[in-house]
Amino acid sequence: MVVFDKPHALADVPMHYCPGCTHGIIHRLVAEVLDELGIEGRTIGIAPVGCSVMAYDYFNCDMIEAAHGRAPAVATGVKRADPDKHIVFTYQGDGDLASIGMAETVHAAARNENITVIFVNNAIYGMTGGQMAPTSLPGQVTQTSPYGRDVKHCGFPIRVCEMLSELEGPEYLERVTVNSVKNIRAAKKAIKKAFQNQIEGKGFSLVEVVSSCPTNWGMTPQAALQWIEEKMLPYYPLGVYKDRTAEEAQV
Ligand SMILES: Cc1ncc(C[n+]2csc(CCOP(=O)(O)OP(=O)(O)O)c2C)c(N)n1
Protein backbone atom coordinates (compact mmCIF):
# COMPACT_ATOMS: atom_id res chain seq x y z
CA MET A 1 0.00 0.00 0.00
CA VAL A 2 1.39 3.41 -0.95
CA VAL A 3 0.95 5.77 2.01
CA PHE A 4 3.25 8.59 0.92
CA ASP A 5 3.87 9.68 -2.65
CA LYS A 6 5.26 12.60 -4.62
CA PRO A 7 2.50 15.03 -5.62
CA HIS A 8 1.78 14.90 -9.35
CA ALA A 9 2.11 18.69 -9.65
CA LEU A 10 5.73 18.48 -8.44
CA ALA A 11 8.23 17.57 -11.17
CA ASP A 12 10.31 14.45 -10.53
CA VAL A 13 13.71 16.18 -10.74
CA PRO A 14 16.40 16.94 -8.15
CA MET A 15 16.14 20.47 -6.76
CA HIS A 16 19.14 22.80 -6.59
CA TYR A 17 18.31 24.17 -3.12
CA CYS A 18 20.92 24.08 -0.34
CA PRO A 19 20.66 21.49 2.46
CA GLY A 20 18.09 22.64 5.00
CA CYS A 21 16.53 25.28 2.73
CA THR A 22 12.76 25.30 3.18
CA HIS A 23 11.90 26.25 -0.42
CA GLY A 24 11.55 22.51 -1.17
CA ILE A 25 9.00 22.01 1.60
CA ILE A 26 6.97 24.99 0.43
CA HIS A 27 7.10 23.79 -3.20
CA ARG A 28 5.75 20.45 -2.05
CA LEU A 29 2.92 22.04 -0.09
CA VAL A 30 1.85 24.09 -3.11
CA ALA A 31 1.99 20.96 -5.31
CA GLU A 32 -0.06 18.93 -2.82
CA VAL A 33 -2.70 21.66 -2.82
CA LEU A 34 -2.81 21.77 -6.64
CA ASP A 35 -3.32 17.98 -6.62
CA GLU A 36 -6.00 18.03 -3.94
CA LEU A 37 -7.96 20.82 -5.62
CA GLY A 38 -7.54 19.15 -9.03
CA ILE A 39 -6.35 22.39 -10.65
CA GLU A 40 -2.87 21.55 -11.96
CA GLY A 41 -4.08 21.58 -15.57
CA ARG A 42 -5.43 25.13 -15.35
CA THR A 43 -2.87 26.67 -13.02
CA ILE A 44 -0.23 29.15 -14.13
CA GLY A 45 2.54 29.92 -11.64
CA ILE A 46 4.69 33.03 -11.80
CA ALA A 47 8.30 32.38 -10.77
CA PRO A 48 10.37 35.16 -9.19
CA VAL A 49 13.99 36.20 -9.30
CA GLY A 50 15.83 34.76 -6.31
CA CYS A 51 16.72 31.24 -5.19
CA SER A 52 13.35 30.01 -6.47
CA VAL A 53 14.00 31.47 -9.93
CA MET A 54 13.96 27.93 -11.31
CA ALA A 55 10.59 27.07 -9.75
CA TYR A 56 9.46 26.68 -13.36
CA ASP A 57 11.48 23.46 -13.47
CA TYR A 58 9.88 22.11 -10.32
CA PHE A 59 6.16 22.45 -10.94
CA ASN A 60 4.29 20.50 -13.60
CA CYS A 61 1.70 23.24 -14.12
CA ASP A 62 2.43 26.03 -16.60
CA MET A 63 4.95 28.57 -15.34
CA ILE A 64 6.05 32.05 -16.39
CA GLU A 65 9.26 33.75 -15.28
CA ALA A 66 8.81 37.36 -14.21
CA ALA A 67 11.48 40.04 -13.88
CA HIS A 68 12.56 40.75 -10.29
CA GLY A 69 9.57 41.85 -8.21
CA ARG A 70 7.12 41.98 -11.10
CA ALA A 71 5.28 38.72 -10.42
CA PRO A 72 2.06 40.34 -9.11
CA ALA A 73 1.88 42.56 -12.20
CA VAL A 74 2.42 39.57 -14.51
CA ALA A 75 -0.11 37.55 -12.49
CA THR A 76 -2.63 40.37 -12.84
CA GLY A 77 -2.32 40.29 -16.63
CA VAL A 78 -2.57 36.51 -16.86
CA LYS A 79 -5.55 36.35 -14.52
CA ARG A 80 -7.45 39.18 -16.17
CA ALA A 81 -6.88 37.70 -19.64
CA ASP A 82 -9.13 34.75 -18.76
CA PRO A 83 -10.35 35.06 -15.18
CA ASP A 84 -12.67 32.07 -15.16
CA LYS A 85 -10.20 29.66 -16.69
CA HIS A 86 -6.83 30.28 -15.06
CA ILE A 87 -5.74 29.80 -11.49
CA VAL A 88 -2.73 32.04 -11.01
CA PHE A 89 -0.18 32.07 -8.22
CA THR A 90 3.05 33.91 -7.61
CA TYR A 91 5.92 32.45 -5.62
CA GLN A 92 8.27 35.16 -4.30
CA GLY A 93 11.08 35.79 -1.83
CA ASP A 94 11.32 38.80 0.46
CA GLY A 95 13.80 40.66 -1.74
CA ASP A 96 11.52 40.09 -4.71
CA LEU A 97 8.18 40.83 -3.03
CA ALA A 98 9.00 43.34 -0.28
CA SER A 99 11.89 45.27 -1.79
CA ILE A 100 12.08 45.68 -5.55
CA GLY A 101 8.50 44.47 -6.03
CA MET A 102 6.84 46.29 -3.14
CA ALA A 103 4.85 48.61 -5.41
CA GLU A 104 3.43 45.69 -7.40
CA THR A 105 2.58 43.85 -4.18
CA VAL A 106 0.79 46.77 -2.54
CA HIS A 107 -1.20 47.71 -5.62
CA ALA A 108 -2.23 44.15 -6.49
CA ALA A 109 -3.46 43.83 -2.89
CA ALA A 110 -5.22 47.20 -3.00
CA ARG A 111 -6.96 46.19 -6.23
CA ASN A 112 -7.92 42.88 -4.62
CA GLU A 113 -6.66 41.00 -7.67
CA ASN A 114 -8.02 37.48 -7.58
CA ILE A 115 -4.60 35.82 -7.32
CA THR A 116 -2.70 33.71 -4.79
CA VAL A 117 0.65 34.93 -3.51
CA ILE A 118 3.14 32.62 -1.77
CA PHE A 119 5.63 34.88 0.01
CA VAL A 120 8.78 33.14 1.26
CA ASN A 121 10.35 35.29 3.98
CA ASN A 122 13.85 34.05 4.84
CA ALA A 123 15.06 37.46 6.06
CA ILE A 124 17.89 37.63 3.52
CA TYR A 125 18.76 37.85 -0.17
CA GLY A 126 19.64 34.21 -0.66
CA MET A 127 20.48 33.89 -4.33
CA THR A 128 22.87 36.81 -4.53
CA GLY A 129 24.91 35.71 -1.52
CA GLY A 130 23.28 36.91 1.68
CA GLN A 131 22.77 40.66 1.49
CA MET A 132 20.40 42.45 3.90
CA ALA A 133 16.74 42.15 2.93
CA PRO A 134 13.77 44.37 3.82
CA THR A 135 12.84 41.68 6.34
CA SER A 136 16.32 41.18 7.91
CA LEU A 137 15.99 41.50 11.68
CA PRO A 138 17.45 44.35 13.73
CA GLY A 139 20.99 43.30 14.62
CA GLN A 140 21.05 40.53 12.00
CA VAL A 141 24.49 39.97 10.50
CA THR A 142 24.41 39.84 6.70
CA GLN A 143 26.97 40.47 3.97
CA THR A 144 25.91 44.11 3.81
CA SER A 145 25.40 44.56 7.57
CA PRO A 146 28.52 42.82 8.93
CA TYR A 147 28.10 44.45 12.36
CA GLY A 148 24.39 43.60 12.46
CA ARG A 149 21.47 45.53 10.97
CA ASP A 150 21.61 49.00 12.53
CA VAL A 151 18.06 50.37 12.34
CA LYS A 152 19.36 53.96 12.67
CA HIS A 153 21.27 53.50 9.46
CA CYS A 154 19.22 50.87 7.58
CA GLY A 155 15.70 51.42 8.86
CA PHE A 156 13.39 48.82 10.32
CA PRO A 157 12.25 45.50 8.85
CA ILE A 158 8.92 45.46 7.03
CA ARG A 159 6.11 43.28 8.34
CA VAL A 160 4.28 42.60 5.10
CA CYS A 161 1.09 40.98 6.48
CA GLU A 162 0.58 43.73 9.07
CA MET A 163 1.21 46.45 6.49
CA LEU A 164 -1.14 44.99 3.87
CA SER A 165 -3.83 44.38 6.50
CA GLU A 166 -4.32 48.17 6.67
CA LEU A 167 -5.58 48.11 3.08
CA GLU A 168 -9.25 47.56 2.33
CA GLY A 169 -8.41 45.47 -0.74
CA PRO A 170 -7.01 42.10 0.25
CA GLU A 171 -9.24 39.13 1.04
CA TYR A 172 -6.86 37.01 3.07
CA LEU A 173 -3.45 37.43 4.70
CA GLU A 174 -1.85 34.80 6.89
CA ARG A 175 1.66 34.22 8.24
CA VAL A 176 2.82 30.63 8.75
CA THR A 177 6.13 28.82 9.10
CA VAL A 178 7.57 25.41 8.24
CA ASN A 179 10.01 24.74 11.10
CA SER A 180 8.08 21.78 12.57
CA VAL A 181 5.63 19.12 11.42
CA LYS A 182 2.79 20.90 13.23
CA ASN A 183 3.64 24.20 11.58
CA ILE A 184 4.03 22.57 8.14
CA ARG A 185 0.48 21.19 8.47
CA ALA A 186 -0.84 24.64 9.38
CA ALA A 187 1.08 26.16 6.46
CA LYS A 188 -0.56 23.73 4.04
CA LYS A 189 -4.00 24.63 5.36
CA ALA A 190 -3.31 28.32 4.77
CA ILE A 191 -1.95 27.69 1.26
CA LYS A 192 -5.01 25.60 0.40
CA LYS A 193 -7.31 28.34 1.62
CA ALA A 194 -5.42 30.90 -0.46
CA PHE A 195 -6.09 28.82 -3.59
CA GLN A 196 -9.68 28.04 -2.62
CA ASN A 197 -10.35 31.75 -2.19
CA GLN A 198 -9.25 32.30 -5.77
CA ILE A 199 -11.45 29.46 -7.07
CA GLU A 200 -14.38 31.07 -5.24
CA GLY A 201 -13.52 34.49 -6.72
CA LYS A 202 -12.85 36.11 -3.36
CA GLY A 203 -9.68 37.98 -4.29
CA PHE A 204 -6.11 38.67 -3.22
CA SER A 205 -4.79 35.99 -0.86
CA LEU A 206 -1.24 36.07 0.46
CA VAL A 207 0.46 33.47 2.63
CA GLU A 208 3.75 34.57 4.16
CA VAL A 209 5.94 31.57 5.02
CA VAL A 210 8.68 32.34 7.54
CA SER A 211 11.56 30.31 6.16
CA SER A 212 15.19 29.40 6.72
CA CYS A 213 18.40 30.07 4.81
CA PRO A 214 21.05 28.02 6.66
CA THR A 215 23.73 28.80 4.06
CA ASN A 216 23.51 32.57 4.28
CA TRP A 217 22.58 32.66 7.94
CA GLY A 218 25.77 30.62 8.53
CA MET A 219 24.04 27.86 10.51
CA THR A 220 23.31 24.18 10.36
CA PRO A 221 19.83 23.32 9.06
CA GLN A 222 18.80 22.34 12.61
CA ALA A 223 20.09 25.58 14.14
CA ALA A 224 18.29 27.53 11.42
CA LEU A 225 14.94 25.97 12.39
CA GLN A 226 15.70 26.96 15.99
CA TRP A 227 16.57 30.51 14.88
CA ILE A 228 13.16 30.76 13.20
CA GLU A 229 11.51 29.85 16.50
CA GLU A 230 13.64 32.06 18.74
CA LYS A 231 14.37 35.12 16.57
CA MET A 232 12.04 35.27 13.59
CA LEU A 233 8.70 34.40 15.13
CA PRO A 234 8.82 36.99 17.94
CA TYR A 235 9.32 39.65 15.24
CA TYR A 236 6.98 38.02 12.72
CA PRO A 237 4.13 36.52 14.76
CA LEU A 238 2.16 33.73 13.11
CA GLY A 239 -1.53 34.20 12.50
CA VAL A 240 -4.32 35.43 10.27
CA TYR A 241 -3.97 39.14 9.59
CA LYS A 242 -7.02 39.48 7.42
CA ASP A 243 -9.89 37.22 6.41
CA ARG A 244 -12.66 39.31 4.95
CA THR A 245 -15.13 36.45 4.53
CA ALA A 246 -14.69 35.38 8.18
CA GLU A 247 -14.96 39.00 9.36
CA GLU A 248 -18.14 39.60 7.37
CA ALA A 249 -19.67 36.39 8.73
CA GLN A 250 -19.20 37.73 12.25
CA VAL A 251 -21.07 40.98 11.63
C1 LIG B 1 16.19 44.20 -11.48
C2 LIG B 1 17.11 43.29 -10.70
N1 LIG B 1 17.75 43.77 -9.60
C3 LIG B 1 18.54 42.97 -8.89
C4 LIG B 1 18.73 41.67 -9.26
C5 LIG B 1 19.68 40.80 -8.45
N2 LIG B 1 19.00 39.84 -7.60
C6 LIG B 1 18.79 38.57 -7.99
S1 LIG B 1 18.08 37.63 -6.77
C7 LIG B 1 18.05 38.95 -5.71
C8 LIG B 1 17.54 38.80 -4.30
C9 LIG B 1 16.68 37.62 -4.06
O1 LIG B 1 16.33 37.54 -2.72
P1 LIG B 1 14.90 37.04 -2.26
O2 LIG B 1 13.84 37.63 -3.13
O3 LIG B 1 14.80 37.31 -0.79
O4 LIG B 1 14.89 35.48 -2.57
P2 LIG B 1 15.82 34.29 -2.03
O5 LIG B 1 16.95 34.20 -3.01
O6 LIG B 1 16.27 34.63 -0.63
O7 LIG B 1 14.93 33.09 -2.05
C10 LIG B 1 18.59 40.08 -6.31
C11 LIG B 1 18.74 41.40 -5.63
C12 LIG B 1 18.06 41.20 -10.40
N3 LIG B 1 18.16 39.93 -10.81
N4 LIG B 1 17.25 42.02 -11.10
Image (cartoon, rainbow, N blue to C red):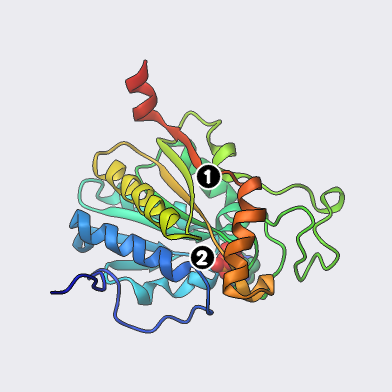
Q: Quadrant of residue 42?
A: bottom left
| Horizontal side, residue 187 vs residue 60: left or right | right
Instruction: Determine the quadrant in which ligand 1 lies.
Output: bottom right
Q: Relative to 85, is 54 on the left or the right?
A: right
Tell me what residue is drawn at x 75 percent, y 67 percent: 142
Q: Please name the residue that numbered disc 1 is placed on.
A: 238
Q: Quadrant of the C terminus?
A: top left
Q: Secondary structure at mark 2?
A: loop
Please identify the residue farthest to the top as the structure is shown: 251
Which mark sits nearer the N-terminus, 2 or 1? 2
Quadrant housing the N terminus: bottom left
Give percent across and percent down for residue 92: 49, 60
Q: Is residue 126 visible?
A: no
Labels 2 & 1 near each other (Cβ < 8 A) = no
When the figure is inspected, residue 198 is found, relative to residue 180, above or below; the finding is above
Residue at image mark 2: 67
Q: Amino acid at mark 1?
A: Leu
Few, some or many C-alpha atoms within 10 Å of disc 1 (few <14, some 14-19, many ≥20)? some
In front of the other: 164 or 72: 164
